[in-house]
Image: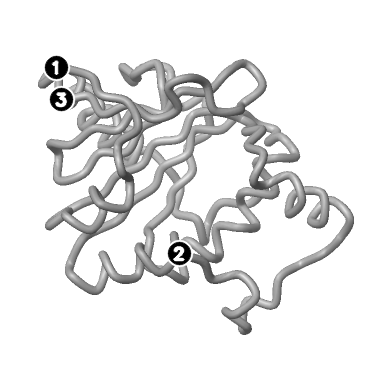
Amino acid sequence: MKRSDPDFFELLRSAHRSALHLEMRDSYGLADEVEDFTAWRGGHRADWADRSVWWNSFHAAVADAVSRGVVMRRARIVSEPVSEYIRYEHYLTTANVTAGEEVRWLPRRLATAIPLPGNDFWLFDETALIVNHFDGQGDWASPGMELDDDPDAVKLCASAFELVWERAVPHADFTV
């Protein structure tokens, strides 16, 4: 059964063991990032020592989950050479890591033998699956997020994530 518009933050608050996120696009055109992306392109860089400048509700939720013992892992499959957006995302990953996420990067050429789902996703405690839907430009499509409790979809996503994670490069070792 699929339900639109799940509450991501509620699922993260209710997670006990894990929150996994797989990203497979080389660019996202999300409207809420346009200003920051443009500033980054213009040379603006965050002062990572000053959390008041960049820390937000997502980072706070991650830090809270991690403090409760939830292991948060994010894996990104990327083409090489990486896109400008991926360079921007790599730069921003400092915030994710500071909040407590573990992040790895997998060059797309190493993903050929991995059975992958067709969409990015979040998987909480290997039971609650949120599928992310984007249009061709990387903007949210309708529905943007969809809760999917199909056991086969959950199993595929969990397996795909672990296979990607095993092959991926830790953030600190991945250069763009």
Q: Secondary structure at mark 3?
A: loop
Quick one: label 1 or label 2, which is nearer the N terminus?
2
- The residue under the point 10% across, 21% down is 151
Q: Which mark is residue 57?
A: 2
Q: Which mark is residue 58?
A: none
- Between disc 1 and disc 3, the foreground one is 3
Q: Which mark is residue 152?
A: 1
Indicate the quadrant containing the N terminus: top left, top right, bottom left or bottom right.
top left
Residue 49: percent from left, percent from top: 61, 83
The amino acid sitting under disc 3 is: Asp
Q: CA distance from mark 1 to mark 3?
A: 9 Å
Q: CA distance from mark 1 to mark 2?
A: 32 Å
Taking depth in this image into account, of 105 and 124 the one nearest to the observer is: 124
- The residue under the point 82% across, 49% down is 38
Q: Is residue 106 left or right of residue 123?
A: right
- The residue under the point 45% across, 64% down is 57
The amino acid sitting under disc 1 is: Asp
